[in-house]
Image (cartoon, rainbow, N blue to C red):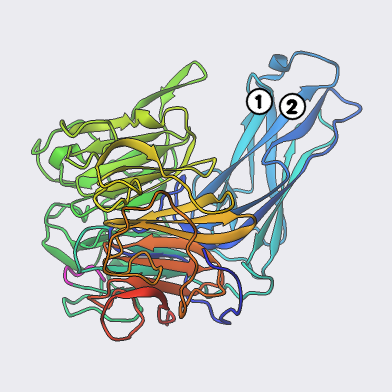
Amino acid sequence: MPLPAPRSAVPDADHTTGGVSRRAAVAAAVWAAPVISVVAAAPAFATSGAVSLSIVSPAGSTDAYTGSDGVTQQFTAQLASTAGAATSSLAGRVVTFSLAGDDRSWLTLGAARTKVDTTTAVVDANGRASVTVTFNTAVLPASIPASVTLTATTPTAPTPAVWTITYRAGTAGTAVQRAATTLTCAHNAGSNVAAFAIRNGRLYGWGSNLYGQLGLGTSAAGPRTPVRIDGGTLAGKTIVAVDNCSRTVVALAADNTLHAFGAGSNGQLGDGSTSTTAYSPVAVDQSGALKGKTIVAIASAPAHSVVVASDGTAYAWGSRSGGALGDDNASGAPGAQLTPTAVRMPIETVGGVTTTARFTAVVAITGITVALSATGRVYTWGTANISGSLGNGTTSGDVLRPTQVVGLAGKNIVAITAGSSHVLALGDDGTVYGWGRNDSGQALPGSTTAQLAPVAVPKTGPGGYRVRVIAAGLDHSHAIAVDSGTTVRLGWGAQSSGQVGNGVSGTAVPSLSGVAPIAEPDGSSLAGKTVAALGAGPYSTFAIATDGTLHAWGADTSGTLGDDATIGNKSIPVRVAALP
């Protein structure tokens, strides 16, 4: 997406969300604004002692966009015998991983949100030990940049393996304390769209309030610029994640409590009721299946909600229509699930070892759930439909439990997102795969035929860009990529409301032979800025720049774009009003 330039001294948000698809789930999170640089320093093999430690990954210098919260990265060290013993003989030894630095509040070891600075890992048969580092971007360091060291040690290795992890703003000196880090937008079709942003643990919303989805305690029309949402059970809470389907919103607080507001007639509030509407946030019941579970990912659909725990298990509640809850129960058996219930987890075989899959990310759309496992595999379940959103090659037969999307077998998927009826997945090599509804080329540019199984989205244009972030709306798709060191913005699919953001509206673009970077049109609020995160609504799109400012384009029937200007479609990005 766009390039750098003047920055606001007071950035807007940490993350946001909008309509049909909002954020992309990346191994457990939504992408966010600041940039994290990982520089690996690989010590030389020890010349004395029983074993030596060296770095396997990440190697060299690596840049990654942080998620709105909860993005994870694996660090792996190699143990080797200095006496020539077989590597397999080292299996079972223990390596200690430790974080050190004056300000390391934004990092933790492990996939949970609980702060952990030291942990251990057992060496496997290949002599390797790994640890997962979670970037907690809702907690910003006192100053930017901030560096933390990750050290791997074992008693018989005289020299440790050491990584330096640096939290950087998009531009040196950029103030990010008030920047937006999370963005989400309703993903269900329609014009009644609300959008949300999180800044430093505070939740903001704007746009439609038809279903009480702004959680403001009233059914009155929603504001056309961002307002703080802190009523009901959200009072005094620090918010770390939010997801919005257009009718129901689910939020996760730093204290691990779940909250919901908006429509609830299908039990999707998760509070044990079928209340038609919750105009103020209510607490999701965590006394049953979720008792003792630490939540790391959330997703909201029009009639059901899904969460993932730190142990990789998933839980769902709301309408069972078509098997959307994944608990192996058909629609109407026994009907709406009013509180969280366990999803029936699939079995995976990796390296000859069979074990229960561990989910890291989840996306929910109408009647369907999509999940990403720690091994890079994608699973779907729920209602069969003519669009092929399940990605299983057919349009018949509901799927009542998580089933692997076999068309992605052998691919290491690192992020997933979905519109109302199409799904995108991002491979670790930067390839984007799409399937499902495709009447505007939103899954596969150049075609208008529904894609029943994953297909690679073709690239066009000069250079060899590499996609890092994906987002999907009702009939349009978006990505952030890096091309020869420059961050670029991509968009494809329908642009009837200007939702691609290329200055064109009123026509669809299914004739594209591939996807090329978008040149910012004249007057774009993103001109001179670098895009770090995306969210997509039914007919609108949102972006966070690395300076924390929020931007939007597309349909604006309910004040969804948040710019307080005349209601109407906008095919050129505009600046969302600053968060109060």
Q: Pointer 1: what residue?
A: 123
Query: Which residue occupies 58% across, 82% down?
Result: 9
Q: Is residue 156 left or right of residue 452?
A: right
Residue kind at label 1, given as amino acid type: Val
Using the rendered image of the protein, determine whether residue 105 is visible from the camera's viewpoint: no
- Mark 2 or mark 1: whose residue is earlier in sequence: 2
For the image, the number of numbered tags is 2
Q: Which mark is residue 494?
A: none
- What number is the disc on residue 79? 2
Q: Are marks 2 and 1 in contact (CB under 8 Å)?
A: yes
Which residue does the image show at 39% across and 55% down from the upper left?
471
In front of the other: 174 or 473:
473
Within 10 Å of disc 1 (Cα), the crowding (few <14, some 14-19, many 20+) is many
Helix, strand, or loop for circle 2?
strand
* Magenta highlight on residue 496: no
Q: Position of residue 124 (x, y in %)?
A: 63, 23
Q: Position of residue 422 (x, y in %)?
A: 29, 47
Q: Nearer the viewer, residue 382 or 522?
A: 522
Determine crowd level at label 2: few under 14, some 14-19, many 20+ residues with C-alpha closer than 10 A. many
Residue at 52% across / 51% down in the picture? Answer: 468
Q: Can the viewer see residue 269?
A: yes
Q: Which residue is drawn at the image coordinates 15% and 30% (left, top)?
A: 397
Q: Amino acid at mark 2?
A: Leu
Q: Is residue 443 above or below residue 410?
A: below
Magenta stretch in the rendered image: 210-214
Local secondary structure at mark 1:
loop
354 sits left or right of 345 in the view = right
Residue 166 in percent (x, y) is at: 68, 57
Chief secondary structure of the magenta portion: loop
User: CA–CA distance between discs 2 and 1?
Assistant: 8 Å
Residue 211 belongs to the span the image colors magenta: yes
